[in-house]
Image (spheres, rainbow, N blue to C red):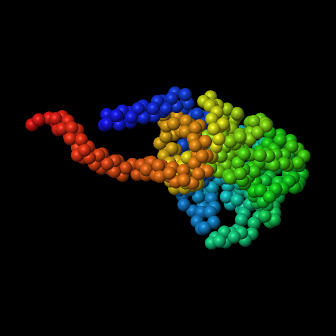
Amino acid sequence: ILTEAIGRRLKAAAVLLFAIVFAWVLIPAGAYAGWERQNPVPQENVLKGAYGSGPNDVFAVGYATGGGGGGGYCFSSDGYSGAILHYNGSTWMSMLSGTPHGFTDIWGSAANDVFAVGTHGSILHYNGTVWTAMKSDTTDDLYGVWGSGANDVFAVGNSVLSDRNTCVTISTSTTIQHYDGTAWATMYSSTNGDKFVDVWGSSANDVFAVGTQGTILHYNGTAWMPSGTTDKILNGIWGSGPNDVFAVGAGGTILHYDGTSWTEVASGITDRWLYGIWGSGPNDVFAVGAGGAILHYDGTTWTEAALGITDRWLYGVWGSGTNDVFAVGNEGTILHLNSTIKKDVAESGGDGGACFIATAAWGSYLDPHVQVLRDFRDHCLLTNRLGRAFVAFYYTHSPPIAAYIRQNESVRTVTRLMLTPIVYGVGYPWLVLLFGGIVVCIWLMNMKLRFPAFAEMNRKQKPSA
């Protein structure tokens, strides 16, 4: 009986080992639709925007939460030190910003002409060597920047005065700043609650600004005029030309402008916000957002990439081309799309990078149990080839299982019971080892009592004095 039980366990172990090796061989490292995780230091950075002049000259900006500040019940990036990272094609390095203000966006016309904007109207300029502060014409927080050239740059932002205890808005103002190559000046301001957060244009006479009140303004080279409106919060805008513009926002909202009017298009997600958008052309557009959401547009349909590589909020996206794209977000997250290792697993479905089965069992990817498993995935599995292969295999095959679990409460309960030891094993490995040692000792003692032959065999194997 003992021999048969051991045999069954060995067979089960062999099947598991075969499955892991099978996944390792057939699913190459980094097989997340071509995306790889890059980890700049320090990890406490919240990265809000990215821009580069080429694949070996990329910037990411944000703020370092480890610096303290912000304060109050109503969160703000103000008070945190500004963070600027630079990528030279192989390594991300921190750069000195020289300001205590956080950054929210970045844009440039060339490697030696880059602008970063942030809180309290702060604007920095990079000349290819150092960053220097520029004098703006506002104290409003600036959230978006874009230009048609070195002497024609736009920055948009707003200021919200709230009660620090209740977060109830007391007053708001919004601004659009313009740089003519010599100085920054206010070209539009309002107190009607527009709160503009991003700007993009196809030329100096065709510029759009979007805001959190669903307002869309258009600049024709002479004046800013309403272009459209929606009841959805808008966070980002980008286009391939004057007749092909996208705006993204809350609840997976994506609007498209065809040169005449704005229409809402299906994004495929409704439970997560979208914050940033960029494309290399009309048939290659990326949108990023909450929960690690990354959407791709091929000229016909928006689809979600089920990457399984992060569930951190992503705020900005930029690329030098269709084969070289960067997405940035919370906790210093930087994802890099490298098509040379591309293997499309997007057809497996998506859950925003969360752990499918655990999320189905506990009902939310924000549940502490799921968080433990996500951290284990990010910091242990995704740091080596075998672990990445296992994650890719899991994200390919687990969605149908998770869907079944999610629909049956009794199955969810059983799944939670089965996963709980794993969660505690990951979260408290030394405690589990201690408990496991005690269990083994009890098992050996039980074997000696139940099977005298086992005890006699163990006694004979001991060396004589």
Residue plotted at (57% across, 54% down): 409
Task: Find residue 86 and report its image quarter.
Answer: top right
**Figure quadrant of residue 453:** top left
Q: If the image is split into quadrants, where does the C terminus sit? A: top left
Please report the residue visible at 75 percent of the width from the left and 51 percent of the height from the top.
253
Q: Place residue 58 in its image quadrant.
A: top right
Considering the image in quadrants, where does the N terminus appear? top left
Residue at the left extreme of this rendering: 465
Residue 377: where, in percent of width, then height?
Answer: 51, 44
- On the image, the x and y values in percent for residue 93 come to 55, 42
- Between 405 and 237, the one lying in front of the other is 405
Q: In the shown orientation, is residue 376 left or right of residue 302?
A: left
Left-right relation of 82 to 276: left
How many numbered tags mark residues here? 0
Answer with left or right where residue 373 lies relative to residue 283. Answer: left
Q: Is residue 272 above or below residue 38?
A: below
Of 410 and 180, the residue lying toward us:
410
Q: Going 67% across and 58% down the picture, which residue do you hit?
A: 119
Q: Nearer the viewer, residue 196 or 464?
A: 464
> Can residue 48 be seen at all in this image of the molecule?
no
Q: Residue at x 47, y 42 (%)?
A: 380
* Res. 166 in view: yes
Q: Quick check: 37 above or below 407?
A: above
Residue 177 percent location from the top left of the image: 78, 55
Q: Is residue 139 above or below residue 37?
A: below
Residues 61 and 404: in front is 404
Q: Position of residue 241 (x, y in %)?
A: 83, 40
